[in-house]
Each structure stands twice: as structure tokens, then as C-alpha cells.
Image (cartoon, grey):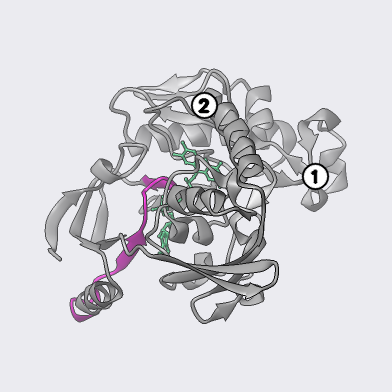
Amino acid sequence: MQFEDNYLLKTITTLSIGGPAKKFVIVSSEEELIEALEYAKSQQMPYLIIGGGSNLLISDDGFEGLVIKNEICDLSTSKVGPDSFEVCVKSGTLLQNLVDYTIQNGLSGLQKLTGIPGTVGGAVYGNAGAYGQSISDHIVSVDQLNKSGCAFGYRNSIFKQSKQPILEVTFQLEPGDPDILKKEAEEVLSKRAVRYPPGIKCPGSFFKNLIASEIPEEILNNIPQEKIVYGKLSAGALLEEVGAKGQSLNGIEISPIHGNLFINKDNGTAKDFYDLAKTYAEKVKEKYDITLVPEVQLINLPWDLN
Ligand SMILES: Cc1cc2nc3c(=O)[nH]c(=O)nc-3n(C[C@H](O)[C@H](O)[C@H](O)COP(=O)(O)OP(=O)(O)OC[C@H]3O[C@@H](n4cnc5c(N)ncnc54)[C@H](O)[C@@H]3O)c2cc1C
């Protein structure tokens, strides 16, 4: 394992944005992770553990500390009941590898997460999900914490507060027909391909959708009911209502097909991205009195729209 100085973070984010990390290291075992954490402590340096960099907007000024890229991978299965299997996975494993593994081995419950970039650790941190499935649905434990201790919510978990490293995740899955699981995954992938064409530089959806039952009634009454699907009010729909689709600022464009998808088209900066996102979040606030909250993790970029 090798510590590097002034490592340009744009090289490891799917958005291709991010200034230098003062120190950077890739870890591929728990021993290396412990060593990296001890190094940060000894230098009194803040640290940030990242996975695939697919949910990050990192400041153009970078990060004044140690960035630890987690590549600790392993996967094992054991039978825990007549119709129940436990899959134990290290957090640096790519989520896609886990999903493919479960499909090939006829284990149901993660197949609709196919196509989500990044690692299992990153997915647990933000409780990633798609098409009605969330990574937390079949989690039994994360390290020493049982599922209830993880406080999973919509794109939320205890790890967003605790900032504790996520090392190992255990899932309990039931058998499923591999052909059916594969078909379900292929259907998801073909839908995803429209929104996320290969090579797109983005961090996924920028803002969280809103849980309709949490929105005050007087505000909800002003929102066209068709914008609420499965109990969630789509942030993209609100952004589209204020004209976000297709808008751009320098190298950053809001997708012409989805108002919540901000794309780095041409050497855009974190500042461009931030300013564009804020402009349209303010318009949503003005029109609907709804405060959009970023789903993407902002590093060294305080979000000040309340
Ligand atoms: C094209 C595209 C499509 C996407 N589609 C979806 C989607 O459908 N649904 C969805 O939910 N998301 C989606 N995303 C967002 C993103 O892929 C997920 O949030 C993913 O789970 C992030 O994983 P990561 O390893 O890349 O995390 P990173 O971006 O590296 O990190 C995200 C956060 O997790 C923390 N973290 C990462 N690993 C650890 C660890 N081991 N311990 C503690 N903290 C950790 C980091 O500190 C950071 O705060 C999409 C992104 C892209 C680019």
C-alpha cells in the first residue's frame, strides 16, 4: 500500500470532478485499512473512506486530509435454513459483482440493484436502491450492528451520522429461479440504459425524492397529484416544473430527459455543478416552498439551502 500526495480526485469519481486529496491510499485488506486510519490519527488528519466514487461531488479545492479508497473484496455464502442463505460480503466488493453472484447462484432480493455503480460499502452508507428494491431489504447485519441498529431509511443510514467505516455486510436471501432473476435484471438494465447511457459523467440523481407523507398538507395541495408515485414526490418532476431540463452552466448540463440528472459534459467544475443545482433548488423552493436535499455526498462543499 502506497500513500500518494496531492492525488487528483477527479480521476476516481464518476463525475470526473474533484480537486486534490492531500494524501491518498488504496486499501485492499482490513490490516491496510487499520494502518491507514492509524496514519490519519497520527498526523491529526481528517480522513474519508470512499468506494467507487459514484455518489460524490468533491470540491475543486479537494480534500485537506487522507482519502482511503476501499478495495477490500470477498464474498461467501452459507446455508442457514431449508430455504435461506446468508451471503457475507466485504464492503469494497463492487455491488454489481454481488448482484451478479446472487443471480448466478439463484438467490433472490438484490437483482433489481443491477447497474448501480460503486461498492457494497457505498450502497449501505446511502441505502442505495432502485425499482422497488433497496440494499437494506435483506441485510441482517453490518459489522457488529444488527439491522435495526443501522437505522436504514430512504437513502439514509446511521453511517451518515456516525461516519464509522463499513467493513462487512451480511444478507439473508431466499432461493429464486436464476432465469427469472436474470430476466428481471435485464429489464432493469434496459430501462437504466435510457437514463444513463454508457460513459455518462454523473453522480446518479443529485437530489433526494421526497416522502409525500412528510410534506405539510398545505404544500402538498399545490402539487399535481400525478407527480407522486409510490408515496414519493419526484425531485426531478419539481425541477422540470421550474424549467431545469436541458439547462446548463459552463461544462455542466441538466439532462434533457431528466431534471434531476446533472451531467459533466465538458470539463465542468464542482462550482458550476453546485451553482446550477442551487439555482434550480431555489426555484423549487420559491414555487412550491419545498426544500430539496442533495442525495449526493458533498465533500468540502457546505450546502446552505434550508
Ligand atoms: C450512472 C449512475 C447511476 C446511479 N444509479 C443509482 C440508483 O439507481 N440508485 C441509487 O441509490 N444510487 C444510484 N447511484 C449513486 C451511487 O452509485 C450509489 O449511491 C452507490 O451506492 C455509491 O457507492 P460508491 O461505492 O460509489 O460510494 P462513494 O461515492 O465512493 O461514497 C459515497 C458515500 O459513502 C461513503 N462510504 C463509501 N464506502 C464506505 C465504507 N466502506 N465505509 C464508510 N463509508 C463509506 C463515502 O464516505 C461517501 O460519503 C448512481 C450513480 C451513477 C453514477
Q: Is mark 1 within 8 Å of ligand 1?
A: no
Give SS at disc 1: loop
Label drawn at residue 247:
none
Residue 110 can be seen in this image? yes
Q: Is residue 158 above or below residue 218?
A: below
**Do the residues under discs 2 and 1 have CB atoms within 8 angstroms?**
no
User: What residue lies at 44% left-to-right and 73% top-to-bottom?
Assistant: 164
Residue 289 sits in which quadrant? top right
**Which of 188 and 275 lies nearest the eye of the viewer?**
188
Residue 38, magenta (yes or no): no
The magenta segment is 40-57
Q: Position of residue 293 (x, y in %)?
A: 59, 47
Would residue 90 be found to the left or right of residue 194 on screen?
Answer: left
Q: Position of residue 49 (x, y in %)?
A: 34, 63
User: What residue lies at 70% left-to-right and 45% top-to-bottom?
Assistant: 132
Q: Position of residue 84 (x, y in %)?
A: 66, 68
Separation (CA) of disc 2 from disc 1: 25 Å
Residue 42, magenta (yes or no): yes
- Residue receiving disc 2: 193
Q: Is residue 265 above or below residue 105?
A: above
Would residue 142 be found to the left or right of residue 284 on screen?
Answer: left
Q: Is residue 302 above or below residue 14?
A: below
- Residue receiving disc 1: 231
